Image (cartoon, rainbow, N blue to C red):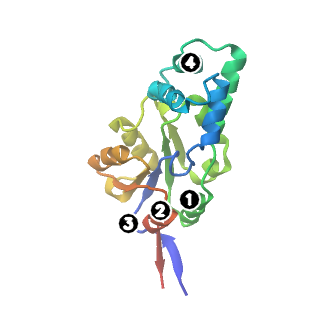
Amino acid sequence: MTLTTANPALDAVILDYNGVIGRQPGAEQWRYLARLANWPDDDIASFQNAFWSARAAYDAGQLSDLAYWARVLGYHPGPRMLRELRAADTAMWTHTDDRVLAVLHNAHRRGLPMVLLSNAPHPLSDVLDTHDWCRRLMTQALYSARLEVCKPDPAVYQLALQATGAADPQRVLFIDDRADNCRTAARLGLRTLHYTGQPADLAAALLTTTA
């Protein structure tokens, strides 16, 4: 008989959202958003460059929805266009990886506390909070727009560590798909897992199976 338990070396886990729990948007989702922005269909790369150029400030809550999209487009969109852009942008980041969620539910059932730490603007943060997996699995969900600072600023890791309630950062695992975010966490004393899309790596880090 085998028994699966949470990793006894861990008191808590801090998880990134996009690229770990959340799936990256596909090409069709990018094309749809670009069409809403009246961008040429044959130039999605330049649209993505414009999209990301002001994203850090938007994620950090320093830009309103209107100000962000004005920077992307080069002009102020009207109310209807802004609503459509905001809705499509938010929707394309809300698809989750069921394989990852299965591992997290398994760890949660075995008593492992989890905190979400995501670089996300206000509209996406508000939607993620309503999702069943977030309400069930996460002790607390922290978003850059509400904190007004993004990873890899050390301040956000300290806030997430406080949210776990763990006294020793060496007993907290930070999981992110970006190596730079993991490097900062490691410098602050947390364990890290640079997630590269393999749920088996996640299971190996969070769960222990004994005979």
Helix, strand or loop status at disc 1:
helix
Q: CA distance from mark 2 to mark 1?
A: 8 Å
Q: CA distance from mark 4 to mark 1?
A: 35 Å
Q: Is residue 118 above or below residue 175?
A: above
Helix, strand or loop status at disc 2:
helix
Q: Is residue 189 left or right of residue 79?
A: left
Whether label 4 touches label 2, CB < 8 Å? no
Tell me the kind of residue under disc 1: Val
Earlier-in-chain disc, 4 versus 3: 3
Quadrant of the frame with the N terminus? bottom right
- Locate residue 136, reporting x and y percent: 63, 53
Q: Residue furthest bottom?
A: 1
Tell me the kind of residue under disc 3: Ala
Residue at the spot of label 2:
202
- Say which mark, if any, is on residue 100: 1
Between marks 4 and 3 in the image, the one whose residue lies nearer the viewer: 4
How would you rate the neighbour count of disc 2 (Cα within 10 Å): few for under 14, some for 14-19, many for 20 or more?
Answer: many
- Say which mark, if any, is on residue 72: none
Between marks 4 and 2 in the image, the one whose residue lies nearer the viewer: 4
Residue at the spot of label 3:
9
Between marks 3 and 2 in the image, the one whose residue lies nearer the viewer: 2
Q: Is residue 118 left or right of residue 29?
A: left
- Locate residue 204, reporting x and y percent: 45, 68
Residue at the spot of label 4:
73
Q: CA distance from mark 4 to mark 2?
A: 38 Å
